Amino acid sequence: MYSLCFFLYSKISVICSFTVNVEIQIIFKSAVESTNCAIEIQTTLHERNKKEEAGRRILLRIGLHIGDVVYVDQQVHGDGVNIAARLEGISAPGAICLSEDAYR
């Protein structure tokens, strides 16, 4: 998991919250920036996973949405976070799920 954290830190300027084995919430300035990052993460992990045993593969589910967020006590809240979390939940392992708003 440490190598994944290092990879993400090297690619993303702002990580808003991180809980090991649960979720990573990342705020981007644009849908294009978030989509490009998600594609790069999944592509890199796909290449890594080709060389790993099944039990050592990292399969992330990524949900992307564009929406308003509010910062309260260093935590992020709002429709932007809630919808992205729901999309992540329905995404297949190793896949990216975009909302219609993020797709536009």
Image (cartoon, helix red, strand yellow):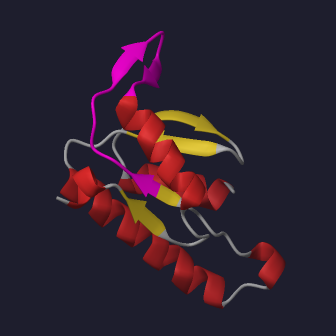
Q: Residue 98: x and y, percent? A: 36, 59
Q: The N terminus is located in which quarter?
A: bottom right
In front of the other: 31 or 101: 101
**Which residue is located at x 67 percent, y 89 percent?**
51
Q: Is 59 left or right of 13, judged from the image as shown? A: right
Magenta residues (range): 63-78
- In the image, taking residue 93 as reference, residue 41 lies left or right, namely left
Tell me: residue 6, above or below residue 68. Answer: below
The answer to whether one can see residue 94 in this image is: yes
19 relative to 40, above or below = above
Is 46 inside the magenta-drawn segment? no
Q: Where is residue 33 in the image (x, y as percent from the top left)?
A: 23, 55
- The C terminus appears in which quarter of the rendering? bottom left
Residue at image location 47% in from the left, 72% down from the top = 42
The reply to whether the magenta stretch includes residue 67 is yes
> Which residue extends farthest front?
100
Residue 99: x and y in percent read 34, 55
